Image (tube, helix red, strand yellow):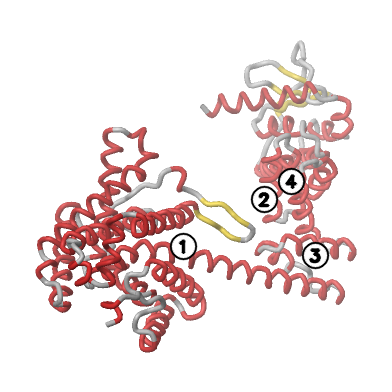
Amino acid sequence: MQPILRLLRAMALLAGLVLAPAAVFAQAGGDAFARFGADSYAETVRAVDALAASGHPQAAVVIEALGQGRLLAGGDTVAIRLPEGGLVDARTGTALAAEPAGLKPVRLNNGVRRAVQAALGGLDLVAPEAGRRIAAAEAVFKSRDAGVLPVLETAIGRESDPRALKLLREAQAAILIGQAQTQPLDRLAAIEVLRGRGDQDALAALRALPADASPELKEAQARAISDIEGRLALWRAGQNLWYGLSLGSVLLLAAIGLAITFGVMGVINMAHGEMVMLGAYTTFVVQELIRTNAPELFGWSLAIAVPAAFLVAGAVGVAIERGVIRFLYGRPLETLLATWGISLILQQAVRTAFGPTNREVGAPGFMSGAFELGGLAITWNRLWIIVFAGLVFAALLAILKLTPMGLQMRAVTQNRRMASAMGIRTGRIDALTFGLGSGVAGLAGVALSQIDNVSPNLGQSYIIDSFMVVVFGGVGNLWGTLISAMTLGVANKLLEPYAGAVLGKIALLVFIILFIQKRPRGLFALKGRAVEA
């Protein structure tokens, strides 16, 4: 495959050579072609540099042929041997009817090979494709290789693409600012160009200003560095805010089901984290079945896993409520101990079925990768999780506000005895509520499988945070849960750079303890006769 690709590339480059004005290329090359016939490594390097400095796109044909051992010289003739056979004149691109006498391959050594490699990289700056020119400009900016400066200046004069032109000027500025022979006005212009770029690489380039620069240049450098550092600090704060929103969406998914069950039933469900774990393992099983039986459907694996995880976790939740919890209402300590025991049973069952090691859950194509928004790096999986959390929240609001079941759930939450007296089957509502909360926890497991390790201990990482969110936001209040999750997520990520992850979480826990001393019902307390009693 590699020889075929090289052949196609050579033919494409040769086509460009034939179609372009030969006289222009010969003039641009100057005496470079004569140097190839000198049979000297030093002269060959000078010839390569001269062709590269011409900036002519067709110079790549000759230099690439040299690197591949297909450039021949003898007397006044310099020819290229084509991969498929035959010779063409290196100056004009015209086919040679017969091989002139005295032609022999131009010799190579390591120095010539390095010159060829550097020249081909520099000639990408004048490549026909804008993408290659942009990539080459970025590479030159980071390397700050002064050897490509002539080609760079030629490329700037020819560039028509605004983005590529901007990057070429930035690469030129990064080289000029560190050159001893650069004029002060050119250095000052380079500082302004780098100041406009404003990223970490620009800071590194600005610090390359020689120590013997004039006070005016050093003052301009200091202003530019201060300006860039200020902007980078703002972007870092924005990045932490984005991380906080991402964490908040995860906490919302993990806690919203707990808010429903805790609010309606008053049950401290220590097995809630295991419902999250079951949702993650359901996603793993769905993907394994798709990989085995219908790999072409892998892109739809999460869409299939969402209802499956909801049903599996919801069914387990209903079984727990009907089999254990309904016998323990009004006895919070026994309920806590029973659900903790259930959580251990579920963990061990999963270890037995799937093993104790982490399981791999793949990401569909639309959730892979990242993109940049200004100075923010945003990953697609986190963005989709935020969207998913918003959809789940909206769906739960619709269920609670627009359906008979939601009306009955709110009635039982506010006054269980009165709801029972009005004919509402509170036992049935308890079972459905526990199933709904567990099903939502299963949905959280689907999302967490994309950003966390799928293991039997997955749920334990989120159970404490979920209770913090519910208590802080207000028991049974969805809007309180939303605001609480986002507040704690953002606060956690903003504290981490200063206090560290562990101390930051401890600070938040202390804050919540102090907060509930003043507002025991949380941010948004439910109202109702039984609730307020």
Are the residues flagged by discs 3 and 2 in contact, CB closer than 8 Å?
no
Q: What kind of residue is marked 1?
A: Ser
Are the residues flagged by discs 1 and 2 in contact, CB closer than 8 Å?
no
Residue identifier under label 3: 191
From the viewer's side, name the closer residue of 527 and 365.
527
Where is residue 269 shown, x and y percent of the image? 22, 69
Residue identifier under label 1: 246
Say above or below: 200 vs 363. Answer: below
Q: Is residue 116 left or right of residue 390?
A: right
Marked residue nearer the N-terminal end (3 or 2): 2
Residue identifier under label 4: 164
Label 3 and label 2: CA atoms lie apart by 19 Å
From the viewer's side, name the closer residue of 224 and 171.
224
Neighbor class of circle 2 (other Cα within 10 Å; few <14, some 14-19, many 20+) is: some
Give the mark toward the camera: 4 or 1.
Answer: 1
Give the mark toward the camera: 3 or 4.
Answer: 4
Give the mark toward the camera: 3 or 2.
Answer: 3
Q: Is residue 476 left or right of residue 498?
A: left
Q: What kind of residue is marked 3?
A: Ile
Neighbor class of circle 4 (other Cα within 10 Å; few <14, some 14-19, many 20+) is: many
Label 1 and label 2: CA atoms lie apart by 33 Å
- Residue 32 is drawn in which quadrant? top right
Label 3 and label 4: CA atoms lie apart by 19 Å
Marked residue nearer the N-terminal end (3 or 1): 3
- Residue 216 is drawn in which quadrant? bottom right
Element type where label 2 sits in the image: helix
Neighbor class of circle 1 (other Cα within 10 Å; few <14, some 14-19, many 20+) is: many
Q: Residue drawn at (18%, 65%), measured in percent from left and top?
A: 343
Give the mark toward the camera: 3 or 1.
Answer: 1
Where is residue 428 shown, x and y percent of the image? 17, 59
Label 3 and label 1: CA atoms lie apart by 37 Å
Q: Is residue 334 visible?
A: yes
